[in-house]
Every structure is written in C-alpha cells, then in structure tokens.
Amino acid sequence: TVMNYEDEFPDSPSIPSGLPDRKMAVKLAQQVVKQSNQTALPIKLSEIVKTLNTERRKIIVKGESLSSGFSGQIVQIGEVTGIMYNSNHNQHRQRFTVAHELGHCLMNHSIGMTYKELINLKNKLKIEKEANIFAAELLMPKALITKCLKNKKQTIGELANLFDVSEEAM
C-alpha cells in the first residue's frame, strides 16, 4: 500500500516558523524506509524513489555537472518532481543531497508559501534543517545504527562505510 503523506501529516507544512520540527522529519523518514521494505545496508535511494512513485506523484532523480557550490535542487511541474544533484560531488554528498531534496518534496516545504516567505532567512533555515534531519534519518536510521552497535563495536569510519555516508554525516 502506498502511504499518503498529506494525510499522515495534515499539519505539514504550514508556513514554517521557529525551530525545525525534528519529530515530524524523523517520523516521516522512518515511515519512508519502512514502506520501502529495506533492511540491508546501505539504504538504496533508488528503491525509496521507486516506492514513492505513484499515479499521483512521479519523482525523477538526475545527476548534472553543476558548479561546485551547487549541491542540488528540486523542481515541481504538476505531479512530476525533479530532483537534480551535482554529479561532480562525491557519492556520499550526492546521496545526502538526494535524500535532502526528497525531504523537501515530502514535507511540501514550498507549497503555499509566497516568494517573500520562502526567501525569509528564518523560514529558509527551518526548512533546510528539517530536510537535513530527514536526510540523516533516511540514510542512517537510528534503529539500524543501534542494531549495528549491539552486534559489535564499530568505529565511525566502519559505520560510515556500512551506511554509505561520510564520516562527518555519521
């Protein structure tokens, strides 16, 4: 069954203000991982995207050679969401960027916001933090990290390798 995120999070998003909603971002990421039935590491973003694609929503992910300061972008055209990431960045950065942009998409960060509200620094910081929280939980689910640590003591580097993320992200 396909989850309807708008029904699951009816209050998200209103125009963002204040602190990021960590609980909502983590819960959403956990639901997405669960829905994609992934238990092996690393989390495969292609499987997540495949699971999220429905008749009502189509997500396309594409790498492009972009300037070094540009990590990614989301573009919405009707029911189609395009996620573009910088193919010049390393694999870990690419994965985090795609997960981050998926967070923006699923949390409807720009829906219903005026241009002025969207560029407001306080609002921008909040939605960027929420997308980062979502991406971190999507790529490094706390439950799977806990499971790995229960089985054997591992270094940050070993965990980062298992989860296919950078040591800084881990």
Image (cartoon, rainbow, N blue to C red):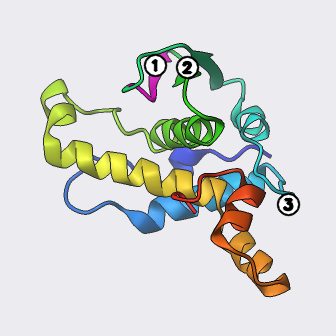
**What's the distance in space between the residues labelled 3 and 2, CA to CA?**
27 Å
Residue 131 vs residue 163, the one in the foreground: 163
Q: Which residue is painted at 53% across and 13% down in the image?
A: 65
Q: Give the numbered dot on residue 39.
A: 3
Judged by its main secondary structure, the magenta piece is: strand
Q: Quadrant of residue 152?
A: bottom right
The correct choice, above or below, for 152 with respect to 38 in the image is below
> Residues at badges 2 and 1 in contact (C-beta under 8 Å)?
yes
Residue 75 lies within the magenta run: yes
Query: Around disc 2, counting alpha carbons within 10 Å, would you say few (fewer than 14), some (14 to 19), or many (20 or more)?
Result: some
**What's the distance in space between the residues labelled 2 and 1, CA to CA?**
5 Å
Q: Which residue is painted at 56% across and 64% down in the image?
A: 27
Report the side of 74 relative to 141 (left or right). Answer: left
Residue 13 in view (yes/no): yes
* Badge 3 amino acid: Thr
The correct choice, above or below, for 112 with respect to 128 in the image is above
Q: Identify the secondary structure beneath mark 1.
A: strand
Quarter of the image with the C terminus in it? bottom right
Q: Which residues are magenta?
A: 70-77
Q: Identify the secondary structure beneath mark 3.
A: loop
* Badge 1 amino acid: Val
Q: Give the numbered dot on residue 82.
A: 2
Report the side of 150 relative to 133 (left or right). Answer: right
Residue at the disc numbered 1: 75
